[in-house]
Amino acid sequence: MIAADTIRLPIPLIFSATLFSAGVYGVLARRNAVLVLMSVELMLNAVNVNLVAFSAHLKDKLFTGQIFALFVITVAAAEVGIGLAIVILIYRNREMINVDEVNLLKW
Amino acid sequence: MTSTEVVFVVLSAVGSIGAFRLVTSKNVVHAALYLVLTLSMVGAAYLVLAAGFLAWVQVLIYVGAIVVLLLFSLMLTKAPIGREALDNQQRGWAALVGAGVLAGLVFLIQNAFGSAPRIQIQPATTSEVGASVFANFVLPFEVVSVLLLAALVGAVVIARRDERP
Amino acid sequence: MGPLAQAVAPSHMPIVLRPLLPELILVGTALALMLLDALRPTPDQRPFVLLSLAGVAGAAAATLSLWTWKGPGSVLGGMIAADRFAVYFRLVILAAAALGILLSSYYLDRAGEARGEYYPLLLFATAGMTLITAASDLILIFLALEILSLSLYLLTGFSFRRLASAEASMKYFLLGAFSSAFFLYGIAFAYGATGTTNLAGIATALASRVNGDALALIAVGLLAVGFSFKIAAVPFHMWTPDAYQGAPTCVTAFMSAGTKVAAFGAFLRVFGVAFLPLAHDWRAFMGVLAAISIIVGSVLAIAQTDIKRLLAYSSIAQAGFILVGLSAGTQAGIQSAMFYLAVYAGTVLGAFAVVAIASVRGEEHTALSSYAGLARRRPLLGLALTAFLLSLAGIPPMAGFIAKVSVFSAAVQAGSWPLVLIAVLASVAAAFFYIRVIVLMYMQDPAPEIEGVRIESDPAGWAAVLAPAFLTVVFGILPGLLFGLLRTASVVRF
C-alpha cells in the first residue's frame, strides 16, 4: 500500500531534464537574442525543479534546495534586466538583434 | 502510480510541450506565451512538491515580472516573425545536441535514482523556510542584494540615452 | 522544540565578520562612489579614481591582516574560508584591480567615456572576484560568480557609442548566462548526490562512498563546463576573442587578469576540496581540456591581425597551461598553477595596458601593422611589450618561463608526461607569433599614416605598464619571493 502523497524521485528529475534539454536546443538553434534568453530561463527553471525535488527527497531540514531556488530566481531576474538593457543598447545602434548577424566581430 | 504522481506527470507533460513549442515557435509573442505556460506548470510542480512559498514566488517574479520584461524586450525591438528570422542554420545540429543531453540525463537519472525510496511529501511552511533563510543563509541573502544593486545600476547606465555631448 | 526553533538554532554561533572585511570595504567604497556621483556630479575623474584606489588599498590591508588569522578555518556557517589560499588570490585580484583603475582613468579620459558609474561597477566586479576565492559553499560561489559576471557584461558594453562594444557585451552576456545554467545544474546534482552545498561537506559525503557514483560525476562534469567558460578554455572559449576585442581596452585588461584568477581560484578550491575524492576521474578530463586549449589557442593566435584578438587567443592558451598544473592534482600542481596565475595576471594586464597607451585614443590603432616600428617611436613602451610577450612565450629570464617550468615539472611528477610533451611542443610553436610581434616592433619602419601619431602618456598609464613589467622581470629572476608565500598559501581545506 503506497500512501497517496508520495512520488518517485525520477519523475520530477526527468521533467527537469526535459526542460533543460529544450533550453539547450533553444540556445543553440535560435538567432534572436530575446529568444535565446528565454531558452536560458528554461534551463534555470530546470535547475530549480531539480533543487526542489532533491530538497524533498533528502528531507533537508535547512531547505537548502528551496532556498537556493529562491536565489536562482532572483539572479534570473537580474540577468533578464541586464539582458533587456543590452538588447536595447544594440537595437538603438543597429535596429537588429540577431546574434549571428552581429558581424563587426566574428561569431 | 499514486494520484500525486498522476497530477505531476500531467503537469510535466503540459510544461514540456510548452517548452518544446517555446523553442520551435515561429512567432516571438507565441513563444513568450508558451514560456508563461511552462513557468506556470513549474510553479504548479512546486505546489505538488509542497514548496508553497516558492510556487508563489515563481508566479510573482517569473510569470509576473520576468515575462513582462521579456515581452518589453520583444516589443521594443520589433522582433520579426518567421522561421528564417528566428532560427539559425544549425537547427539539425542543435536538435542532435538537445536530444543527446536529454537521453544522457534520463539514462543517468534512472540509473542513479531508479530504485531510490519514494519522496514522502512533507509540506514546508513559509515560516519554516523564512526562518531557515535568516538563520542559515543570511550571507547569501546579503550577497544577492549586492548583486541586485550592481545589476540595477549597470542596467540603468547601459540603457540610458547619453545626454551629454 | 518545534521545527521553527530547530531551524533558528545555528544563529547562536558568534558572527565573525573579519574574514569578509575586504569585500565589505570594496562594496562600501562602491556605495560611497555612487553617492559621490549623485551628490556632486563632476566631469573630473580624479576624486573617483582616488577614492576607488583607497578602497582597493583598504581591502588589501584587510586581506593582509588575514594572513596571520588565528581563528577558525571557515566562518559564517562554513561559507567563508579564512585561509591563506584566499589571501593570496585576493591580493593578486586587488593588485589587478588597482592597475585596472589607473589604466581606466587614462583610457576613459582620452576616449571621452568617463561616467560616474564606471568605478562602482569595477569595484562590484572586484568584490565578486575576491569573494569567489574565499567562498567555500557552492551557493556563495555561484552568487559571487554572478556578481562578477554581471558587472563585467556591463563594463564590456560601457563604450555605448561603439557598436563593437555593445555586440561584445551581448555575446559575452548570452554565452555567460548559458554557462551559468550549466554551472547551476551541476550544483543541483552535487546537492542531490551529497545532500549539501558545503565544499567540505561534499568531500566528506563523497569520501564515504566505496565507488564513485555516476551522479557526482555528472555534477563534476557540469561544474567543469561552467568553470571552463569563465576561464576561457577550449571548447568553451567562443566569447573570449570578441569580448576582449570589443570591450574598452581598460576593461579588457582588468577582466582578462581578474576573471581568470578569480575563476581559477574557485576552480582550484571546488575541485581540490569538494571533489578531491573523485580526483582520479577528473584529472584526465582536465588534461584533455588543457591540451586542446593550448593547441587551439596557439594555432588560432598565429592567424590574428589585431593585437587585442592575438592577446585573447594567447590567454586561451595560457588557461591551458594553468590547467596542466591543475590536472596534476597534487600540492605541487596547485602551487605551480597559483604561481602561473599571478604571473599571467601581471603579464596580460601589462600587455593590454601597452595596447591602451599605443592606441592613443579609444580603440584606434589596434591592428598589428600599427605596431611596426613602435620600439623606435616609443622605446620604453616597446621594451615593456617585449618583456610581456617574452613572458607569455615562456622565454627566460621572464617570470613566464619559471611559471611554465614549474607547471610542467608538477605534471611530470604526477606522471602525465604526454600532456607535458604536447604543451612543450605547442609553446615552442607559439613562441613564433610572440617573436613575430617583437620583430615587427624593432625591425620594421612605422607605416606612414602612423608615423606622425604622437603617443602621449601620463603617470597613471605608465604605472599600469611599468609596475607589471617590473614584477615580470623580478619574479623571473627571484621566483622564490612568490614560492615562499605559496608554500603555506597553496593548502586548501575548506
Image (cartoon, rainbow, N blue to C red):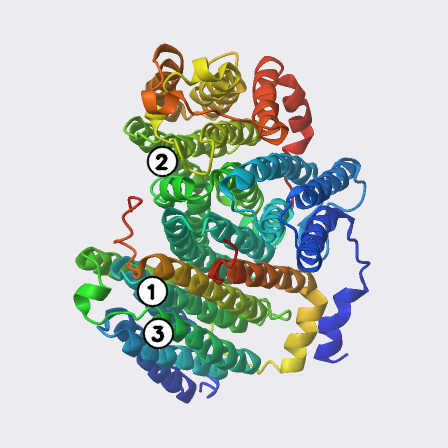
- Same-subunit check for callouts 2 and 1: no
Q: Residue at x 42, y 20 (%)?
A: C393
Residue C493, above or below C443:
below
- Same-subunit check for callouts 1 and 3: no
Tag of residue C288: 2
Q: How far across and how far down the image is residue A49, in percent?
A: 45, 71
Name the chain under label 1: A
Horizontal arrangement in the rendering, residue B14 relative to residue C80 (left or right): left
Which quarter of the figure has residue B24? bottom left
Horizontal arrangement in the rendering, residue C487 relative to residue C113 (left or right): right
SS at badge 2: helix
Marks 1 and 3, how far apart in space?
22 Å
Give the residue number, with chain letter if any, for mark 3: B75
| Residue type, numbered disc 3 | Met
Q: Residue at x 29, y 52 (%)?
A: A102
Tag of residue A23: 1
- Viewer-side residue, B3 vs B31: B31
Marks 3 and 2, how far apart in space?
45 Å
Horizontal arrangement in the rendering, residue C114 relative to residue C314 (left or right): right
Q: Residues within 10 Å of mark 2 (few under 14, many from 20)?
A: some
Horizontal arrangement in the rendering, residue C482 relative to residue B90 (left or right): right
